[in-house]
Image (cartoon, rainbow, N blue to C red):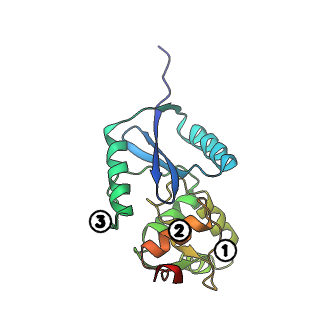
Amino acid sequence: MPVQDPILYTQVFPSPAGDLLLGECEGTICLCDWLSNPSRREAMARRMQKGLHAVFLPCDTPLLREARMQLQAYFEGERQTFTLPLRLVGTAFQQEIWEVLRKIPYGQTCSYAAIAQQIGRPRAVRAVANAIGANPLSLLIPCHRVIGSSGKLTGYAGGLEAKRLLLVKEGALPLPDSFQ
C-alpha cells in the first residue's frame, strides 16, 4: 500500500497589516506567512513541500480557526502571546534563531547583531538576518520585533509598513504624529 503524503491545510487570514496564509499539517501550525510578495510565497511553498513532503489543500480546520481567532485577538489588542502548537520547518540554524525570536517580549525590539551575539556568533549577523527572513511563522514567531542596530526598521516579509504598524500596535514605536 503506497504511503500518502501529509496534507497541509491552508486558509487566508485578512489582517489589518495584510493577508496572511495560515497552514496546518498534522495538528501543528507550520505556516503564517504574508501573501504580499509572490516570489517569496512561491519559495516558501517549495520549502514547505520539501520540508514536510505535504500536499497543499485549501480547507478550514479547527486548529486554523483557533489560529485566526488568536490572530484577531492580537490585532484587537486582546492578546500578546500565542498558544498554538507550532512546527518549525527549516535548518537547525534557522530553528535556533527562531527560538531566540520567540523570546523577544511583546512591545520590545532586538537587533540582528544582538541576536548574533546571543547565540555566540557575533560575526554571523548576515546569517541571522537570512534565517529571520526565512521565518515561515510571521507574528507567531515575532520576527517583526527585530530591527537594525541603529534602530532603523529593516527588511520584513510583510513589508516595512506592516512591520511599522505591528511595532506601533505593540507600543515598541511611537504613534505617528498624524495619530496623536
Which of the 4 image quadrants contains residue 131? Answer: bottom right
Mark 2 vs mark 3: give the one in front: 3
Residue plotted at (46% across, 61% down): 139
Question: What mark, if any, has residue 144 been given in the picture?
Answer: 2
Residue plotted at (50% across, 58% down): 138
Left/right placement of residue 170 relative to residue 120 reads left
Element under label 1? helix
Q: Amino acid at mark 3?
A: Glu
Q: Amino acid at mark 2?
A: His
Taking the view exactly as shown, the residue that stands out farthest to the bottom is 150
> Does any portion of residue 88 appear in the rendered image?
yes
Q: What x and y, as percent, mark residue 175?
A: 48, 80
Residue plotted at (36% across, 56% down): 72
Dot 2 or dot 3: first in sequence order is: 3
| Position above or below: 98 against 178 | above
Element under label 3? loop
Q: Nearer the viewer, residue 55 or 172?
A: 172
The residue indicated by pointer 3 is 78
C-beta proximity under 8 Å, tags 3 and 1: no
Q: Nearer the viewer, residue 149 or 80?
A: 80
Left/right placement of residue 27 relative to residue 97 reads left
| Position above or below: 71 against 31 | below
Left/right placement of residue 85 relative to residue 154 reads left
Alpha carbon distance from label 3 to label 1:
34 Å
Dot 3 or dot 1: first in sequence order is: 3
The residue indicated by pointer 1 is 125
